Amino acid sequence: MPEIEFLQIFQGIATMAAAEPVIAIARVVLIALGIAFVYLGVKGTLEPLIMIPMGFGMASVNAGVLYLSATTTGTLFIDPIASDPAQLMDALQINFLQPIYTFSFSNGLIAVLIFFGIGVLSDIGYMLISPMRCMIIAICAELGTIATFPIAVAMGLPFNEAAAIAMVGSADAPMVLYTSLLLARDLFVPITIVAYLYLSLAYAGYPYLVRLMIPKKLRGIKMEQKNIPNISKGEKITFAVITSTLLSFLFPVAAPLFMGFFLGIIIRESGVKPFIEFIGGPVLYGATFFLGLLLGVLFEASTILDPKVILLLILGITALLLSGIGGIIGGYIVYWMSGRSFNPVIGIAGVSCLPTTAKVAQKEARAANKFAIILPWAMGASVSGVISSAIIAGIYVTLLR
């Protein structure tokens, strides 16, 4: 009977023992971090829909390292480097998540699927109540996506990578994924993970930013509920068709995002219940689940050891902070334009992740005045933020790709 060594059986331990100390420590840290993400997701501190699969994937991939040959180590999850047909065929037969990665993740399809779902959940009628106000707020809330770009360039990033990390300021992680795949493929994993991690943390921090910049008296302004125009389904569908066509014409590189979002809106307004339930349920939540899982299994120790990751962490939080400040400034601009009858807290909802920032705005207004209802206007600002962020992404990719 052949002699069997302990480390031959338990290769995860063997690869840990044979690795360089920095890699071994990084693996342990990422395993612990992944478990922490799962815990915080279950607890509700971080967004559970993305953090539970992402954390579990991080822990699993950094634990499950084995010898692929006598001299190389790796995992059986994904080979993101495989690109030519022969490599790809081998990877599809060996790595169990490779088909999902290859056919829906690496080409940005998964981001478009999430945009389908976001569109189905979005009511653009709130935006059409007062489109000019909503777009003013949304444009101001792009401060992070615009101002972070020159900051990143000044800190040494090339233009394409600077634009990709600046898009974190849009607070729209699928859009960040799509943009980084086109502009900075080598960094799309850490950039997208930074986006999702900071979005979960920013939503806990944005209420403090609102309280810091807006006094309680203004936070409690009640919005006039009377005379709100009734936007018909025909008007919403017409707006979605015309806007999607126009934006796709102007920014073809972002056309898949425009198509996904506005087609979702059209399906919602058409009232085709099977489509609404399918796209708003299995498509959206399935895509979100696999996005989190794939991001987790792509986040190996070698990824976190890239010196640029620290820089990305700094720039990501800068982008989100600037966007929050810009959105509140937009809220103040509309407040003054409206004769001081508009609640400036709505400005934070211009940072576009639906519906979280709108909920933050409503919660803060309600805390200041239990009779303040601003959610419809906040949802309108958030929908406008999705559109303005996609436009910024289209400009960046068109100029820098």
Image (cartoon, helix red, strand yellow):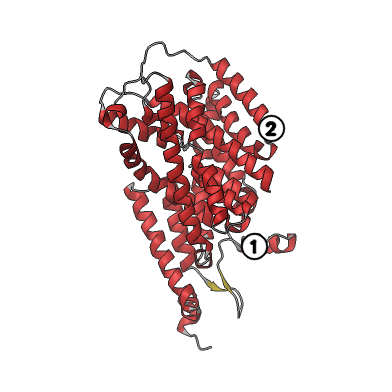
Q: Residue at x 49, y 47 (%)?
A: 289
Q: Residue 61 at what x, y percent from top left? A: 49, 64
Alpha-carbon neighbours of circle 2 within 10 Å: few (<14), some, or many (≥20)?
Answer: some
The residue type indicated by label 1 comes to Ile
The residue type indicated by label 2 comes to Leu
List the residue tagged with mark 1.
81
Q: Residue 72 at what x, y percent from top left? A: 60, 76
Image mark count: 2
Foreground disc of the pair 2, 1: 2
Q: Is residue 142 left or right of residue 241?
A: left
Element assignment for label 1: loop
Q: Residue 333 at what x, y percent from top left? A: 43, 27
List the residue tagged with mark 2.
250
Residue 291's place in the image compared with 370, above or below, is below
- Of 109 and 159, nearer the camera is 159
Cα–Cα span, label 2 and label 1: 33 Å
Residue that protrudes farthest toward the right in the picture:
85
Element assignment for label 2: helix
Residue 372's place in the image compared with 280, above or below, is above
Mark 2 touches mark 1? (CB < 8 Å): no
Q: Residue 191 at what x, y percent from top left? A: 53, 53
